[in-house]
Image (cartoon, rainbow, N blue to C red):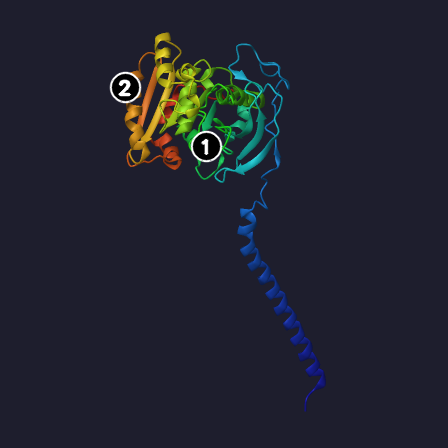
Amino acid sequence: MTNPRNGAYQSRGHRRASRAKRWILGVVSLVVLGLIAWPVLNYFDVFSDKGDAISFGQDGGAGGDKPGGGPGQGADSKVLMPTGPEAKFTVSGTVPEDGSKIAVTTLEGKKSGFKGKVWVWVPPQYKDPKYARSGFPVMVALPGGAGYPSNYWMGTDLKLEASISKWSNEGKSLPFILAMPVLNPHPDTGGLYWDASDIPGQPKMGTWLTEDVPDLIKANFRTVKSRDGWAFMGSSTGGFAGLKSVLQKPDQFKAVIASGPDIVPDSRLWAGHDKEKAENNPNVLAQKLIDAKHPDVYLAFQVGTVGSDAQAKPKIEEFIKKFGNKGPVKTKLSVIQGGDHNAKTYVPNMANGGLIQWISDHMQGPEPAS
């Protein structure tokens, strides 16, 4: 005979078991959906701080247009404290290796009149309290190609920021602040470039790169006051831009790492402006600097042996043979066997070829508090 009370207990036990199964299935479903959705949401930066405001602090800067740095800074100091005004930066990305941030701002150049984006990254040492009153060297990093509307060095895929961070910890490089502006005023239209120059009747990209962008960095960051803290690096057209800028303004910039660069200006916008074109020709500028006998500049080149780099290599070697290590023009060449015209090739060879170490040895880094 069936016990009705026992049957009731079994019925309630069955319902509890069913509810438990449903609860477990619900939790498992949520976990599975989460695992599926997370990569998608993460890809679209749902969980990132991209676009959030970020401030690097003025660190005692003057807070205005007045040059000379923050209060209490002696005239003989090697450090230039931020001069202000502070720019509005937002987070553009995060370096996975150390969590440091890449920031971006839109700069309306007071001297060039050009308006464009500039990405900035500071090494982890910048926030170390022992360097709180130290000036950091700056490297203006320029891309190849159109270099507009973005500068590809701001992406973490090429690992420029992560590499500088790693190399500085290993003693192979100074802890450079990276400034990464757009290179040209418009997208590439049939190979049209502005040669990082003030071509008559065109946007003043030379002034933008060598005056406005450095002014932005000086306004917002602790930098080295002299040219000993200022360098360029770039690939292809960006390599030409850095090379030309250092030779053209050696009183402002001391070194460059030029990767697979052009050696002469070749924009079709120079038509009818031969005099101005010559004033932006590294061959002319190098000879002019040799004749002047000072100041010293350090021109590091790297080039591959495959593809278009194989074609660029003889021209770079010819330039070095003609001007290299003559008077103030110091040069170093690293040939990347099997390397092609590719930023992913150039970044690791900056260390492997000894180029970043070479220019760092001739520049000034931050000095920790005693």
Question: Which residue of the protein is positioned furthest toward the top in this rendering?
Answer: 292
Which residue position is annotated with label 1?
146
Tell me residue 167's x, y (percent). 41, 31
Depth check, front residue: 144 or 327: 144
Task: Identify the mark at residue 134; answer none if there is no mark.
Answer: none
Q: Amino acid at mark 2?
A: Lys
Q: Is residue 39 left or right of residue 174?
A: right
Depth check, front residue: 253 or 163: 253
Task: Identify the mark at residue 321; answer none if there is no mark.
Answer: 2
Question: Counting other residues with Cα less than 10 Å from the Cα at mark 2, is it few (<14), some (14-19), or many (20 or more)?
Answer: few
Q: Is residue 311 left or right of residue 237?
A: left
Question: Counting other residues with Cα less than 10 Å from the Cα at mark 1, is it few (<14), some (14-19), or many (20 or more)?
Answer: many
Note whether residue 283 is visible. yes
Numbered disc 1: secondary structure: loop
Tell me residue 16's x, y (percent). 66, 72
Depth check, front residue: 113 or 20: 113
Q: Is residue 255 left or right of residue 63?
A: left
Tell me residue 103's x, y (percent). 55, 33
Q: Amino acid at mark 1?
A: Ala
How many numbered dots are placed on residues in this image? Answer: 2
Q: Marks 1 and 2: in contact by CB < 8 Å?
A: no
Q: Residue at x 60, y 38 (%)?
A: 51
